[in-house]
Image: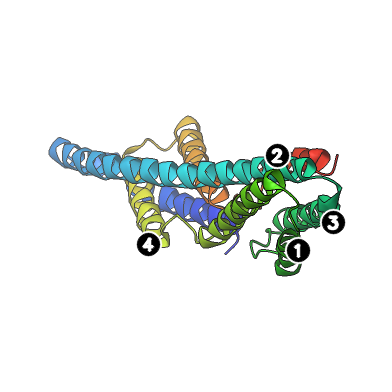
Amino acid sequence: MNDEIIGLITFGLLVVAIVAGMRFSEERFDKSTKETVKLAVSLVSTMSALVLGLLVSSAKSSYDTVRSEVIEMSAKAVFVDRLLQGYGPDAAEARTRLREAMEANMNRLWPQEARRSGDLTPPAEAGNAFYLALQNLTPKDDIQRSLKTETISSAIDIGKVRTLLLAQSVPSVSMVMLVVLVSWLVIIFFSFSMLAPINGPAIVALVISALSVCGAIALILELDRPFGGLIGLSSEPMRNALVQIGK
């Protein structure tokens, strides 16, 4: 389901909880009842805060990990290109294939179509052509043999990082935890509105609070989608690598 739709559904549920809670006036409750409700809401609020913090931490950790892997892949590609440059003119085809593979990667991860999630599947054709070009290199001395060995090792590392990106494409945010969190939030806002006076400032405060909570949930879902959405990863590291590759 789209992240924005989940945010809107959550906000709608919280507004319904606020309206439903206001049907109960605090004047109907005695002091002991109010204190009991406040204690119960405090407990649920604490648990909700813990779960919300856990989800934010999990999503941010996943986002940072993917970002580090993109930077690592870009840096290793530049390093491989420098090794091939040191190998000599015979590696010209391999350098060309490397650039094509990196371009294919960038086009898959950051497609030009607006608001479309990137394709994490490695570009097999371009990648295979690059590895084949490396294997076809015929070293003429010990230096070229050493460069070829190091280049192949670094190229394999790039392939491992690229495969790791695909393996990590599974959402890090548990939908069960998200559903439980939204349920707790509905209870909290119902209780808040039940104890709140029915006037403009109180209603505005509750609605703003609901918007803030929904914004936090939307942020969690956006962080869990690093190659799409409003705060997706920047393609700048890979673009910078492409500028250097082949020079």
Residue 20 marker: none
| Residue 34 or residue 44, whichever sits in front | 44
Query: How far apart are the two marked residues, 1 and 4, measured between alpha carbons?
Result: 51 Å
Residue 221 lies left or right of residue 140; in this view the side is: left
User: How far separated are the C-alphas under marks 2 and 1?
Assistant: 29 Å
Left/right of residue 108 with respect to residue 37 in the rendered view: right
Q: Which of marks 3 and 4 is nearer the N terminus?
A: 3
Q: In which quadrant of the rendered image does the N terminus lie?
A: bottom right
Image marks 1 and 3: residues in contact by CB distance under 8 Å: yes
Dot placed on the residue nearer the N-terminal end, 1 or 3: 3
Picture residue at 36% right of the left edge, 37% below the top? 196
For mark 4, give the secondary structure: helix
Q: Earlier in the sequence, mark 2 or mark 4?
A: 4
> Which residue corresponds to mark 4?
176
Mark drawn on residue 237:
2
Disc with the residue nearer the chain's start (1 vs 4) = 1
In the picture, measured across the screen, residue 83 lies left or right of residue 11, that is right
> In the structure shown, which secondary structural element does the residue marked by tag 3 occupy?
helix
How many residues crowd mark 2 within 10 Å: few (<14), some (14–19), many (20+)?
some
